[in-house]
Image: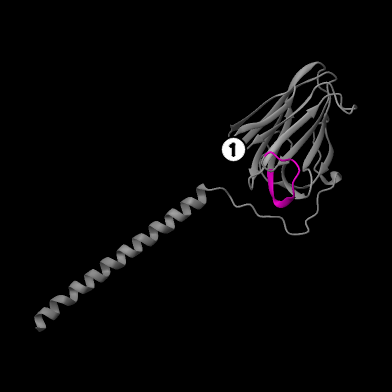
């Protein structure tokens, strides 16, 4: 009987060690999978603190191209984001929706060639499921230029949701950035452009301090 007990001792020890090894391997596999998912998934978006104010137009970082200037802002908090800008000397901006109504940043583009068609472009990265829109018109000093239009873009599925007016529009992924654009004729070498943040295909909604985009640059080419 003593001999059988002596033989069972090492057997039990080896089984315990085997079970322990299996549990350790399973735990390591679970941890590795979790880390991989965290690395491959989208970065979490942190909402702005309650009471964060909308940004005044004077506080929006200026465009360094003399032909571009900001015209207006509504329903947005604007922050400079560190990184290499897509367009030389343009700061990368985080645009976050706040409050009710429309959420837009407007610019004036001038010094262009008259009676030419330009591609008005923006490089963006969505945050918290935001969509994006571009509206533009020529003859900036008038209420409504003869050439005008708008397009809204579904950033997740990379498609044009809707387009109005005499514009052509498109969206594509270029490197790490989504490029969205509209093509529009200008009779006077100018545009007034509104860049909209959208919830689905809606431009007027209640911003939650989270839904927004990273704007890497704008251009008219």
Give the quarter of the image for residue 94: top right
Choose between 216 and 146: the one closer to the eye. 146
Give the quarter of the image for residue 181: top right
Label 1 belongs to which residue? 176
Magenta highlight on residue 214: no
x then y, percent, for residue 29: 38, 57
Q: Is residue 15 above or below residue 114?
A: below
Farthest residue, direction top: 115
Q: Is residue 152 above or below residue 187?
A: below
x then y, percent, for residue 125: 64, 41
The figure's colour scheme reads one colour
* Residue at (74% x, 40% y) in the render: 203
Secondary structure beneath dot 1 equals loop
Q: Which residues are magenta?
A: 201-213
x then y, percent, for residue 152: 69, 34
Choose between 155 and 49: the one closer to the eye. 155
* Residue at (66% x, 34% y) in the render: 153
* Residue at (82% x, 42% y) in the render: 73
Choose between 28 and 71: the one closer to the eye. 71
Q: Is residue 26 above or below residue 54?
A: below
> Which quarter of the image is occupied by the N terminus?
bottom left
């Amino acid at each position: 009987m003593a001999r059988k007990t002596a033989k069972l001792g090492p057997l039990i020890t080896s089984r315990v060690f085997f079970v322990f090894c299996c549990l350790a391997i399973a735990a390591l596999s679970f941890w590795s999978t979790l880390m991989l998912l965290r690395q491959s998934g989208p970065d979490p978006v942190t909402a702005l603190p309650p009471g964060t104010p909308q940004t005044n137009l004077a506080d929006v970082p200026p465009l360094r191209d003399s032909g571009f200037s900001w015209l207006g802002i509504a329903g947005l908090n604007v922050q400079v984001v560190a990184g290499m800008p897509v367009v030389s000397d343009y700061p990368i901006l985080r645009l976050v929706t706040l409050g009710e109504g429309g959420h837009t940043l407007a610019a004036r583009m001038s010094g262009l060639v008259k009676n030419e068609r330009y591609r008005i472009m923006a490089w963006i990265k969505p945050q918290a499921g935001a969509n994006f829109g571009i509206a533009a018109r020529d003859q900036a000093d008038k209420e409504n230029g003869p050439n005008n239009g708008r397009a809204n873009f579904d950033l997740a599925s990379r498609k044009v949701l809707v387009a109005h007016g005499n514009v052509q529009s498109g969206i594509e992924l270029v490197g790490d950035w989504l490029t969205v654009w509209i093509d529009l004729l200008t009779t006077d070498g100018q545009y007034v452009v509104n860049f909209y943040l959208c919830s689905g295909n809606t431009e007027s909604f209640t911003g939650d301090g989270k839904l927004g985009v990273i704007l890497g640059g704008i251009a008219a080419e």
